[in-house]
Amino acid sequence: MDKKKILLLSLGHLSCDINGGALPALLPFVRASYGLSYQATGGLMFAFSCLSSIIQPLFGWLADRFSKPWFIPLGVLLAGCGLAAVGFMSDYWAIFAAITLSGIGAALFHPEGARFANKVSGRSKGMGLSIFSIGGNSGFVLGPLLVTGCVGFWGMGGTAVFACIAVCMSAILLWQIAHMSGFKKNFPDGGAPSVPGSGAPADSADAGADMPGVNNWREFFKLMVSIVARSTLFVGFNTFIPLYWVNSFGQSKAAGAVALTVFCTCGVISNIIGGLLSDRYGCIRIIRLAFVLMVPVVFAFSLADNLYAACALLPFLGFVLYAPFSSLVVLGQKLLARNIGFASGVTLGLATSMGGIAAPCLGWIADNHGLPRAIQCLGLVALLGMLFAFLLSSGASARARGTSA
């Protein structure tokens, strides 16, 4: 593993996803300022997660064919400046467009960033992708705190801080990437490097994964259902945890942001654990275990009728939602070994967009039946994800180990 490069990518990921982390905590301020309904508020998450993320597979496809390292700093720049613009607009559709621009920045960054992270991780792909995703998850942790502090102190204009971060970080990334020729030289074929003698465990659907140039579309489509389920849960909880604290428990907007931060912090820790375990025991085992635990935790959270019970469940909720993340991405990259950039765009982008589609639907349920009922619907989504996690084939494990041994 090239630690310098993976840490640089992780830092870029933090700078990109701090905007996505800030958005849910910004929504209560936007809603209070403009009197938006839950459904309209969910529509803003739709703008970020869906309309923008649909194009990530396209950027990933381009990355497979024409390496574009400058997608990484450009993505960071657009993500930050788009979110910063929200504080200086009053028209709903202008805000919608600015958030969409921020999402397009994230769409540019993630496929290329994940493709390079796969390359520089060597044999420890689970750990490498975990370090990469730690940057993004840390952004989701810091985002709510930063937006709450800045908007609380300066008003809506405080979102300008995200443009400052984006400009500075994109300049650093552009400078560093321009001097890191190894990003291309080490992997001239544009695909994942083969690692003879690798002792990393392979699982089931890792099937053709460890065999260079093999795409296993059938297993990839099964995996996609689990990824979409996990993304729907992730978008849903990121959108409604702050609103749940404010409207169901009568807490302040700052308390809602803190709850979201606790949720994401526990997720960062579990992401590290999940990456280590996936390198040791295989991706599919970790994915299945996470979904098995996810179902009861989500239903228990939806039934929590007081603040203390909800707070006690937050760490467990963060754990089960974040632990399988790197395993899902690594497995997707392995299943489409010939198109790692495209696989990254689909697993990090299209799947997230499908999760974003659910945000307005969940908002409608919350408007008409209450937030607890909307969260109970997320429990059914977790059940679907668990079903398809167990439908992934495990018969190719031995074959995959044989090719890597």
Image (cartoon, rainbow, N blue to C red):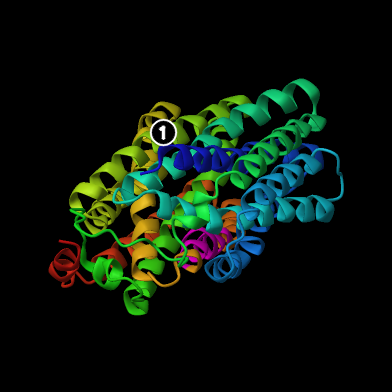
Residue 242 visible in the current orientation: yes
**Residue 193 location in percent, x, y?**
36, 61
**Residue 162 location in percent, x, y?**
71, 35
Residue found at x 76% / y 43%: 81
Above/below status of 231 relative to 85: below
Q: Is residue 83 left or right of residue 284?
A: right
Quarter that holds the N terminus: top left
Residue found at x 50% / y 66%: 346
Residue found at x 50% / y 35%: 138
Instruction: Tell me if residue 10 is in the magenta stretch.
Output: no
**Residue 308 location in percent, x, y?**
40, 26
Above/below status of 377 relative to 398: above
Quarter that holds the C terminus: bottom left
Q: Is residue 329 left or right of residue 359?
A: left
Above/below status of 12 relative to 364: above
Instruction: Tell me if residue 345 is in the magenta stretch.
Output: yes
Residue 39 visible in the current orientation: no
Q: Is residue 367 left or right of residue 209?
A: right
The dominant secondary structure in magenta is helix
Q: Nearer the viewer, residue 345 or 268?
A: 345
Please, what is the three-letter code of the amino acid marked with disc 1? Answer: Ala
Q: Residue furthest top?
A: 153
Q: Nearer the viewer, residue 85 or 71?
A: 71
**Residue 227 location in percent, x, y?**
41, 61
Q: Which residue is mark 1?
A: 310
Q: Which residues are magenta?
A: 343-356
Q: Nearer the viewer, residue 173 or 376?
A: 173
Bin the neighbour count of mark 1 within 10 Å (Cα to Cα): few under 14, some 14-19, many 20 and up: many
Q: Which of the 4 image quadrants contains residue 96?
A: bottom right
Q: Nearer the viewer, residue 398 or 371?
A: 398
- Counting the numbered discs, the total is 1
